[in-house]
């Protein structure tokens, strides 16, 4: 048994595995792309939730980052990150935690999309970006909404207007690079139009922030944009592969699991990774290829043709052949170790407290903690 396999065999399953070499390749790919597009990259660390990964994303030095929870902001600030964007609409009740971080020297910017939020954050002296709706996906103001200028004026009066932000959430359903590039252009146009509207009203708008993993990789032109955001790109997953944003071999995250039973008469193999280990996310169900609860690989990470986790209970996964395919199940004896590629890396990683890291250079398995909470 090779050293890596021997290390994996000593782990209790299910366990979250991270391929460092693949992750590093993904990180480097987007860093080069952002540079070629002439924008600052502000990685979103909501998926990683790990100071070790944050250090690698920043090339060894703390750089600008995006977070989705104040727990992330607090943890990453403690790890040396100062320039942090909290990219979820701010609730006034959370401003006390925000101001506590500002008092500790964190340059924390919040996100909002209403005059009411602007009044609360301006009164607290908290810098903010105005969220712009580029595709009707979720929250944000349309570039022509009169509330945009009203919100901007409230913030500017207290010197807390930092700029605008857009997120093309519909890009996660865009199949192919051309469709994703169209989403990126829509994202860019909306953010730039909003920034231009604020400037025409006499308001400074230094930051124009856009991004999602699909649009960050597909954007052709980012004229007028100052920074690019993306998150799941460092790991990728089956949803991203299903829309063509990555290849299967770009997926850096998997769940190690053990074969615990067989039901040959029903065409089933039982594993000890259920939805508590894989998550309930079924993001590929609406795609041309439904990957069930995950794609089955051997211990080396090679995909086993037409095998998916077709159903999951809390601690049991059920491996079967993909619907519409024929033939016997492979010989996977009791105790055999498998790896499952996840539908949604964010949701799967959230089920685990640590990464078991397959090192990029020969050496023993590493363990990197990850944190949780809001």
Image (cartoon, rainbow, N blue to C red):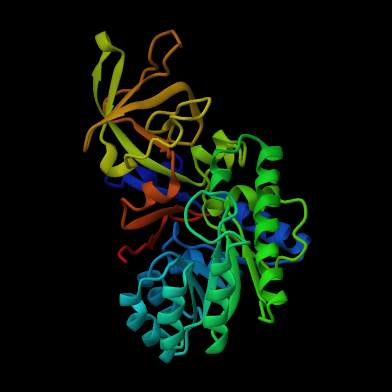
Residue 334 is at least partly visible in this image: yes
Location of residue 103 by image quarter:
bottom left
- Res. 62 in view: no
Say which quadrant the N terminus sits in.
top left
Q: Quadrant of the C terminus?
A: bottom left
Above-or-below relation of 231 to 261: below
Q: Which residue is found at the position 65% from the left and 43% from the top?
A: 180
Residue 341 in the image: above or below residue 354: above
Q: Residue 112 in the image: state x and y as whole percent.
A: 47, 69
Q: Residue at x 61, y 41 (%)?
A: 246
Where is residue 72? Give x, y as percent. 40, 69
Front residue of 98 and 249: 98
Count of numbered badges drawn on the protein: 0
The percent coordinates of residue 37 (x first, y second) are 76, 60
Image side of residue 168 versus residue 267, left or right: right
Residue drawn at point x = 51 percent, y = 49 percent: 137
Nearer-the-camera pick, 141 or 77: 141
Determine which quarter of the picture holds residue 177: top right
Please state which of residues 345 and 149 is positioned toward the viewer in this rendering.
Answer: 149
Instruction: Judge whether 127 appears above or below 13 on screen.
Output: below
Which is more toward the observer, 286 or 48?
A: 286
Q: Is residue 249 left or right of residue 113?
A: right
**Taking 337 as reference, is 57 above or below it?**
below
Name the residue at the front extreme: 146
């Amino acid at each position: 048994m090779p050293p890596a396999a021997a290390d994996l065999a000593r782990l209790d399953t299910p366990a979250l595995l991270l391929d460092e070499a693949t992750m590093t390749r993904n990180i480097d790919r987007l860093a080069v792309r952002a540079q070629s597009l002439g924008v600052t990259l502000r990685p979103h660390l909501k998926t990683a939730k790990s100071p070790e990964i944050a250090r690698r994303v920043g090339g060894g030095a703390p750089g600008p980052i995006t977070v989705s929870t104040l727990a992330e902001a607090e943890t990453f600030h403690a790890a040396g990150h100062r320039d942090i964007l909290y990219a979820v609409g701010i609730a006034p009740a959370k401003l006390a935690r925000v101001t506590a971080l500002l008092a500790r020297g964190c340059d924390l910017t919040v996100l909002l999309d209403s005059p009411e939020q602007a009044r609360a954050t301006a009164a607290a002296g908290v810098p903010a970006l105005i969220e712009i709706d580029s595709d009707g996906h979720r929250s944000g103001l349309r570039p022509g909404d009169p509330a945009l200028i009203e919100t901007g004026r409230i913030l500017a009066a207290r010197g807390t207007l930092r700029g605008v932000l857009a997120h093309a959430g519909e890009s996660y359903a865009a199949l192919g690079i051309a469709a994703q590039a169209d989403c990126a252009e829509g994202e860019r146009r909306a953010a730039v139009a909003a920034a231009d509207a604020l400037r025409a009203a006499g308001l400074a708008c230094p930051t124009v922030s856009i991004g999602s993993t699909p649009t960050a990789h597909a954007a052709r032109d980012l004229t007028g944009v100052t920074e690019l955001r993306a998150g799941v790109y460092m790991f990728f997953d089956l949803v991203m592969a299903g829309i063509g944003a990555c290849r299967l071999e770009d997926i850096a995250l998997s769940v190690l699991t053990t074969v615990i039973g067989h039901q040959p008469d029903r065409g089933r193999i039982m594993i000890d990774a259920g939805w508590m280990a894989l998550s309930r996310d079924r993001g590929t169900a609406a795609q041309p290829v439904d990957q069930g609860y995950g794609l089955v690989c051997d211990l080396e990470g090679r995909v086993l043709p037409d095998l998916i986790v077709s159903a999951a209970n809390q601690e049991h996964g059920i491996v079967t052949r993909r619907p519409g395919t024929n033939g016997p199940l492979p010989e996977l004896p009791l105790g055999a170790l498998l790896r499952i590629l996840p539908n949604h890396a964010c949701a799967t990683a959230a089920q685990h407290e640590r990464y078991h890291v397959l090192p990029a250079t020969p050496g023993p398995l590493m363990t990197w903690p990850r944190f949780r909470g809001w």
